[in-house]
Image (spheres, rainbow, N blue to C red):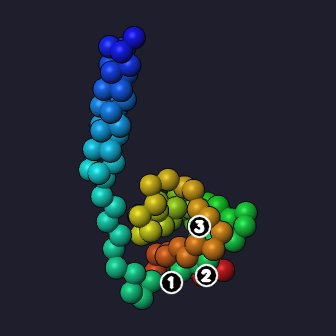
Amino acid sequence: MVVIGVALLSLGGFWLGTRAAGHAAVQVVVPGHAGLPWVEVHQGDTLWGIADALTRGGDTDAVVAEIKRLNGLPDSLIRPGTRLYVPNDTAALR
């Protein structure tokens, strides 16, 4: 029983170590935001909705990708109250 317990603890420690090492290698590089326009995320907003409002029917996928890059977002999850920097060349801000 002791051997099984030690083996499980060792495997758990190994697993946690590999998870930590994997996350430590990830580096998010966010460019300077000086002069960039921004929008504040409100309840119910999505990146696609924001991009659509900014492009007025243009290429929303490209604008979503650029917003994610500018803000260092690893995915499309945004939270109300967050300030999102948007590309300079968007048609209009909300």
Q: Is residue 46 above or below residue 83?
A: above
Q: What quarter of the picture does the C terminus occupy?
A: bottom right
Q: Which mark is residue 37?
A: 1
N-terminal-most mark, 3 or 2: 3
Q: Is residue 12 above or below residue 56?
A: above
N-terminal-most mark, 2 or 1: 1
Asked whether the residues under the numbered discs 3 and 2 touch, taking CB atoms below 8 Å apart as contact, a structural biologist would say no
Residue at the spot of label 3: 51
Give the camera-side residue of 15 and 51: 15
Q: Amino acid at mark 1?
A: Pro
Give the camera-side residue of 52 and 19: 19
Q: CA distance from mark 3 to mark 2?
A: 10 Å
**Is residue 26 left or right of 81 when viewed as pictured?**
left
Q: Which mark is residue 13?
A: none
Residue at the spot of label 2: 93
Which residue: 30% across, 26% down?
10
